[in-house]
Image (spheres, grey):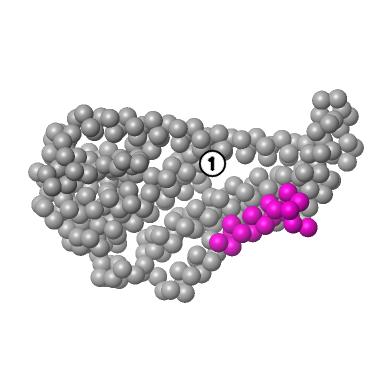
Amino acid sequence: MLAIAVLLGALAFALAWPIPVLLSRADWPSRAPAVALALWQAIALAGGLSMIGCLLAFGAAPAGSLPAAVAQLAPTLAAGPIPPVFGALQIAALTLAAAVALLLTANLALIAVRAERERRRQHQLVDILSDPLPGDPRTRVLAHPVPLAYCVPGIRTATVLTDGLIEALDPDELAAVIAHERAHLDQLHHLVRLAFRAWHSAIPWFPIANRAERSVAALTEMLADDGARRSVGADALRRALERVGTAGEPGSYPGGASGASPDTAMLAARLDRLDRPGIRTTDAHGLPRAARGAVLAASVALVVVALVAFAAILGILP
């Protein structure tokens, strides 16, 4: 059990600092945003499981498994005494593991509830204040001079534009913006970003959480750009981004998929990748197939290792 604690501790450390830092600084994610997004999700899931599992494995080591530790400790917590094989460090580790798991789970649930309330409020406001775009009832138009575009996810989705945006863009550029927002909805980016927003909210003092949330936001924007590029073409999307990419964008409202990001560095990265021939002219991810396969295999391996170790802690595996 102590060997599992050491293994998970090393994995948790690697996924909490060096690996996310290297990934956030790498160039290849912009060429393969879907693969990079899968890796970020694996890092977050495996990192959380490893951190909690390390504490549980250390705390349960005297009993051999977590169920056995609970069976030995539960009857003595109120009446005492604590079994002598369990020291203060083991009790502290088990308590901390439970607290971290509760914090992450409760915060995710709270963020999800708030997001759902905000989505409902947004849908109500959109229904009251907007009109359907002629020929496209799924797209709503707000009477507002500032050029804005965003999408509202949910069971009933909506893409929202303003009069200012429609006046500022040519028809093909407007089609690119709509395709970008629809890609966010179709690919459920709001759920991915919600999970990382919850992680950052639970541990705002943890620098990697902020780095992960920003990287995931950038990757979802690039994936939506790819959807628009395949539908309309890179030239129209580029012109739309150049015209309104920095003009009073709303960003992502709580629980929303996206508005175009006002971050100028993110915008510059998005424009830069649209100029890359391998990304403009093909639907390939811009990475060799072997490299994509290696990253996806590493993503799966991270999660499998954490889950297998957790199964051993729970006594499911010998």
Which residue is at 21% across, 50% downward?
Answer: 177
Extreme top residue here?
79
Dot 1 falls on a residue whose secondary structure is loop
- As for residue 117 lying within the magenta part, the answer is no
Which residue is at 25% across, 70% downward?
Answer: 281
* Front-most of residues 279 and 315: 315
Image location (x, y in percent) of residue 223? 34, 56
Query: What secondary structure is the magenta-colored segment mainly?
Result: helix
Establish if 289 lies above or below 225: below
Residue 167 in sight in this render: yes
Figure disc tally: 1
Q: Is residue 29 left or right of residue 109?
A: left
Image location (x, y in percent) of residue 21? 50, 54
Q: Quadrant of residue 164?
A: top left
- As for residue 303 lying within the magenta part, the answer is yes
Of the 4 image quadrants, the one containing the C terminus is: bottom right
Image location (x, y in percent) of residue 199? 51, 41
* Front-most of residues 105 and 216: 105
* Front-most of residues 168 and 296: 296
The residue beneath circle 1 is 206
Q: Residues within 10 Å of mark 1 (few under 14, many from 20)?
A: some
Image location (x, y in percent) of residue 132? 16, 39
Residue 21 in sight in this render: no
Establish if 313 lies above or below 229: above
What span is in magenta?
A: 300-318
Which residue is at 38% across, 49% downward?
Answer: 188
Name the kind of residue labelled 1 in the image.
Phe
